[in-house]
Amino acid sequence: MVDGEGAPVSSAYVLVNATREVSQLPDYVSGWTEETGLYTLYLPPGEYFVGAAVTFPTGPGMKLEKRLPAVSSQSDIAIDVVLTAK
């Protein structure tokens, strides 16, 4: 995970949901990011939206702006998630 200037973000997490809007809790959540901004998240096949946050839970109504490529059972996807301040 990186910030808007490309610097790694630690102590944040990635959230993934089947819909753009998260009503309560997201469908999937990574562990906290490392100092280097690295995280790992395993997802079942499907189509998802992805976002990031530094507080948990994020609260209802968070909108995830980035759509992930379709995840298949054979997929290994590397994606940078940008944490933006709201």
Image: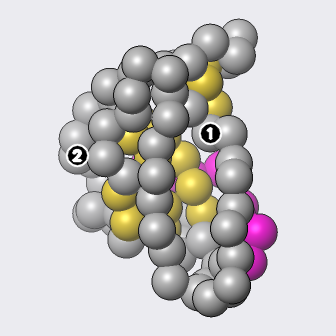
The image's colour scheme reads: secondary structure
**Direction from residue 5 to residue 29 in the image, left or right:** left
What residue type is disc 2 on?
Pro
Foreground mark, 2 or 1, reads 1
Q: At 27% from the left edge and 32% from the top edge, which residue is drawn? A: 55
Q: 14 or 85: nearer the eye?
A: 14
Percent x, y of residue 36: 50, 22
Q: Quadrant of the N terminus?
A: top right
Give the vertical position of 31 relative to 77 (above or below): above
- Quadrant for residue 28, please give it: bottom left
Give the vertical position of 63 relative to 43 (above or below): above
Q: At 57% from the left edge and 55% from the top edge, which residue is drawn? A: 50
Q: Which residues are magenta?
A: 62-70
Q: 79 or 47: nearer the eye?
A: 79
What residue type is disc 1 on?
Val
Query: What residue is disc 1 on?
Result: 81
Q: CA distance from mark 2 to mark 1?
A: 18 Å
- Quadrant for residue 74, please give it: bottom right
Q: 48 or 79: nearer the eye?
A: 79
Q: At 41% from the left edge and 19% from the top edge, which residue is drawn? A: 35
Give the number of the disc on residue 57: 2
Label 2 element class: loop
**Direction from residue 1 to residue 74 in the image, left or right:** right
